[in-house]
Amino acid sequence: MRRALALLLLLSACSAGRKVAEDGRKIRVFYNNDNFAYLETCGCRVSPIGGVDRRWNAMKAYPDDSRIFLDAGNLLFKAQRATEFLAPQWYEQAVGVVDAYNLLGADAVEVGVNEFALGLDKFRELANRAKFPFISANILEKDSKKLFLRDSVILHRQGKKIGVFGLFGKDLPLPSTLEAQDPLPVAKRMVEKLRREGAEMVIALTHQGYDADVQLAQKVSGIDLIVGGQSQSLLQKPDTEGKTLIVQLSNQGQMLGMVEYDAATLTRTDFVVAELGGEFSQGPKDLANPMKSLVAVTNLRIQEANRGLDEKIWAEKFPEEISFETSITCRNCHEKQAAFHDGKAHSAAFLTLMSAKKERNLDCVKCHSVGFGMPGGFQAIADAFRDAAGKPVPLEKVRKLAGLNFPPPGVSYRADGARARADVEHWNASLQKAGVRKSFVSVQCENCHGAMPGHPFAGPHPGKVTVQACTQCHTPEQAPGWYKNGKLDLEKAQAAIAAMKCPR
């Protein structure tokens, strides 16, 4: 459900580019969870939402001394483990996320299951870079039984002391040298500890899922607010269990959540859940937003990291037999089908990435290519172009032949078949001049029909196109018209596939 329940005051403040006027002292707890390393908008085809620049604008609309910012985990990485070829990119992206949270003034982050995707050493590097603490009161080192991280923080806002402690789900995976204690007895101890230290409000920052948060609220008294993560349960109004509020957002940094309290009485005065849409594109008038520069630098670092990966791949021995023929071979016999395909946005999918300067971002490349990460496919841009002997052809060689300003920034091929056809023909001519005989980039015949090694002289013939071949990339975000209430509308999906069916 994509509805914003934002305060009119918040929206008008951001759109007018000014700060919210104070109407009495407030304490505002902003929160996020399951960010999955997103710095930019979610990439949705319709109304993309999210992004650290919009989050900065929304939060900076409120006075600094009224804000608390907490995150319930899965902040740094997209999954629990990164492949060898994704690891350099994922690390640079995580660095960008840490730097963004430093600028946002994060106060504490509970670790999530994805924080250890690159191992404990890389996590420690990232944690040392952070100006905020990663916390968890129930994760221990197995050998020493010592706490792995700080258990809590005490924050001072508007003359009040707010205690925040972290909890990690007992049955969730951790590196082999760590273990999680039962959260409930730990939570009881932490509430008592923080109250003894003078905390007038106690917040549990948890990465254990909504059901466990409800159980925590029912069985442990003295917690004023539970900010949860892991299950990605979007609560558009806070759940109440006794005197405890429970909040949680969805994922990918798409939403802004805030609980507001009167600073004098610590009673709740408001609650906000808002999509970070275009209305948050403008921040307070006198404050320069640093996030666009940060994101641009992070994308450059990702490009350079993957360029270094290319050099490593060039040094390795390439397989002599390739399972994917790629469309350069297909078009030799299927001229009519190739001409049809050249006028579609699919054929220019990689050009779209080049235009956005994301041609080395492997998270993007996987859906703008064929055979990525598959046997007989390719692992990085270094081996995405092959000559007649199966040896790599550098992307830079093809780009030089195509022209350094090709394609221009911001090109969209979705509704411009003529532009797609002209640019694809120019790109294919550049591939030919560069001596490329197999090119894995852009969406091609074998994305739909499956790999056809040796075709037409050996191996399989083209199979029937299935919906499953398309839905790997045509997700609810990328193809919202294919889905209804989160479920695939088979009739609409099949109609879309029929519109792409090649002529015989």
Image (cartoon, helix red, strand yellow):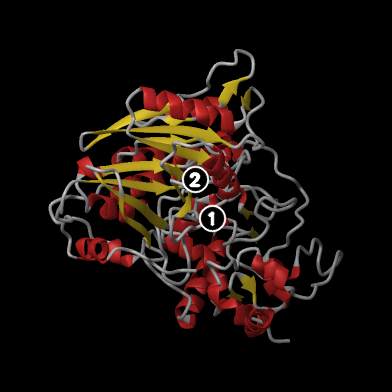
The picture places residue 66, in percent across and down from the top left corner, at: 23, 44
Task: Say what amino acid the circle numbered 1 marks.
Answer: Ser
Q: Is residue 474 visible?
A: yes
Labelled pair 1, 2 in contact (Cβ < 8 Å): yes
The CA distance from mark 1 to mark 2 is 9 Å
Secondary element type, mark 2: loop
Question: Outermost residue, top direction?
Answer: 144
Q: Is residue 429 visible?
A: no
* Residue 42 position within the rendered picture, expressed as x and y whole percent measured from the top left: 46, 59
Q: Nearer the viewer, residue 489 or 94?
A: 489
> Mark 1 falls on what kind of element?
loop
Q: Is residue 95 left or right of residue 140?
A: left
Quadrant in which the C terminus appears: bottom right
Q: Residue at x 69, y 79 (%)?
A: 490
At a point 21% along the width and 34% down the height, the residue shown is 159
Which residue is identified by label 1?
233
> Residue 129 occupies which quadrant of the picture?
top left
Left or right: 488 as drawn, with respect to 229 = right
Q: Nearer the viewer, residue 73 or 46?
A: 73
Q: Earlier in the sequence, mark 1 or mark 2?
A: 2
Q: Residue at x 56, y 72 (%)?
A: 479
Please tell me which residue lies in front, 210 or 109: 210
- Using the image, tell me which numbered label, if any, was put on residue 228: 2
Which residue extends farthest front?
Answer: 242
Given the image, on which type of amino acid does mark 2 rest?
Answer: Gly
The x, y position of residue 279, in whole percent, is 29, 66
